[in-house]
Image (cartoon, rainbow, N blue to C red):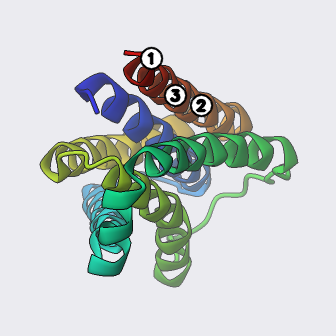
């Protein structure tokens, strides 16, 4: 996979985290550095663990041995994973309920842990897709490492400043980025097959 494809998919995944941070930022009285570090670090750590675990699943000997025999089919399964994640995020955006914005005294750590785990499921599935495509793990790791904390920080500040009315649109844009990345991979695989 090229850097552009990895960045597209990473950006699509990070917009789910951005949308969550946007909603949290809308209900806090003030965004402090401690919250930024805890949330940015927590979401980044969860996403990196999920990416690593997903990549590991794709590299399990039984799975990877089958990949060698069915390499062409696995490429299309990876494309289906990225397209499926894109569709999922678009549906999630369409079904999302409106959030009543009320200022909170502080942010609940238990709730953060739950959302970190939920948003990292997408990254786990993407990690499997990256693994099936034999993507250089270091590239995907760096992209998630850089994009996730930026998404959290930007989301918290944007929510604090403007509220979370744009949450659904942001998640839908993330889904569209994943669809674009999946279509790009599909085109690339079709061109390679035709040669």
Q: Nearer the viewer, mark 2 or mark 3?
A: 3
On screen, 134 above or below 11? below
Q: CA distance from mark 2 to mark 3?
A: 10 Å
Could you say which is closer to the camera, residue 100 or residue 94?
Answer: 94
Could you say which is closer to the camera, residue 42 or residue 187?
Answer: 187
On screen, 90 above or below 103? above
Number of other residues with Cα within 10 Å of mark 1, as a class: few under 14, some 14 to 19, many 20 or more: few
Q: Which mark is residue 194?
A: 1
Could you say which is closer to the camera, residue 174 or residue 37?
Answer: 174
Q: Which residue is mark 3?
A: 186
Give whichever of discs 2 and 3 has the lower sequence position: 2
Tell me where residue 12 appears, x and y as whole percent: 49, 37
Q: CA distance from mark 1 to mark 2?
A: 22 Å
Q: Which residue is mark 2?
A: 179
Quadrant (top left/top right/bottom left/bottom right) for the C terminus: top left
**Residue at 27% over, 78% down:** 61
């Amino acid at each position: 996979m090229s850097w552009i494809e990895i960045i597209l998919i990473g950006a699509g995944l990070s917009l789910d985290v951005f949308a969550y941070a946007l909603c949290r930022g809308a209900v806090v009285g003030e965004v402090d550095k401690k919250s930024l570090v805890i949330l940015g670090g927590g979401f980044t750590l969860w996403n990196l663990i999920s990416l690593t675990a997903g990549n590991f699943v794709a590299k399990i000997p039984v799975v990877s041995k089958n990949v060698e025999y069915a390499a062409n089919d696995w490429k299309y399964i990876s494309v289906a994973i990225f397209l499926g994640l894109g569709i999922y995020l678009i549906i999630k955006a369409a079904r999302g309920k409106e959030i009543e914005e009320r200022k909170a005294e502080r942010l609940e750590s238990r709730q953060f842990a739950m959302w970190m785990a939920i948003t990292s499921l997408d990254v786990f599935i993407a990690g499997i897709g990256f693994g099936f495509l034999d993507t250089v793990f270091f590239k995907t790791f760096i992209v998630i490492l850089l994009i996730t904390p930026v998404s959290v920080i930007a989301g918290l500040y944007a929510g604090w400043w403007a509220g979370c009315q744009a949450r659904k649109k942001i998640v839908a844009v993330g889904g569209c980025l994943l669809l674009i990345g999946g279509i790009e991979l599909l085109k690339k695989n079709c061109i390679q097959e035709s040669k």
